[in-house]
Image: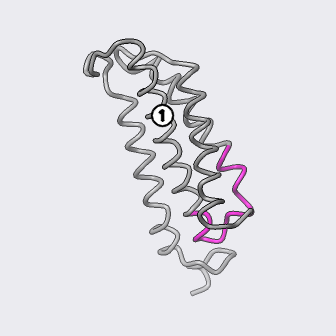
């Protein structure tokens, strides 16, 4: 039975349950980034600037928070917290470049990359505030 536990004593079933939310949210973010540009609503530049960046920040804050909750619940927060931050920031940057190269009518945006990264840090900060752990 020991083979079903990780080094923190958490079963694989519990690990899977806690990682389902971040995986689902990450897939949703990918799907939203893949929407063709022609299918997006037309807005003025000023409207789009504020809503778009706030949306990127919020999506990545939720993703980041869910990743840190999963890491905390599975006892892996101390070991993987900075790897998670790096992976999430790279995910946001990678999605922006993917938009530019593969998705129809979309282009990479440095502002979106910055908003995604800020969302990752906001999610990490929210996790620390809510759970009161400075791990």
Residue 65 position in % (x across, y down): 55, 54
Quarter the N terminus occupies: bottom right
- Read off the magenta span: 70-85
Q: Residues within 10 Å of mark 1 (few under 14, many from 20)?
A: many
What residue lies at 60% left-to-right and 45% top-to-bottom?
122
Q: What is the count of numbered marks? A: 1
- Is 48 magenta? The answer is no
What residue lies at 72% left-to-right and 50% top-to-bottom?
82
Image-based side of 116 in relation to 44, left or right: right
Q: Which residue occupies the extreme bottom position in the image?
A: 1
The residue that label 1 is drawn on is 56
- Considering the whole magenta stretch, tell me its main secondary structure: helix
Quarter the C terminus occupies: bottom right
Image-based side of 123 in relation to 21, left or right: right
What residue lies at 64% left-to-right and 60% top-to-bottom?
129
Q: Quadrant of residue 68?
A: bottom right
């Amino acid at each position: 039975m020991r083979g079903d536990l990780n080094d923190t004593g958490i079963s694989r079933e519990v690990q899977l349950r806690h990682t389902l939310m971040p995986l689902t949210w990450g897939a949703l973010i990918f799907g939203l980034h893949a929407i063709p540009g022609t299918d997006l609503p037309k807005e003025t530049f000023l409207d789009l600037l504020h809503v778009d960046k706030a949306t990127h920040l919020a999506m990545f804050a939720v993703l980041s928070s869910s990743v840190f909750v999963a890491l905390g619940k599975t006892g892996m927060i101390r070991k993987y917290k900075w790897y998670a931050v790096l992976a999430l920031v790279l995910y946001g940057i990678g999605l922006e470049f993917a938009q530019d190269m593969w998705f129809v009518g979309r282009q990479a945006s440095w502002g979106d990359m910055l908003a995604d990264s800020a969302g990752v840090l906001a999610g990490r900060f929210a996790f620390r505030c809510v759970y009161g752990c400075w791990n």
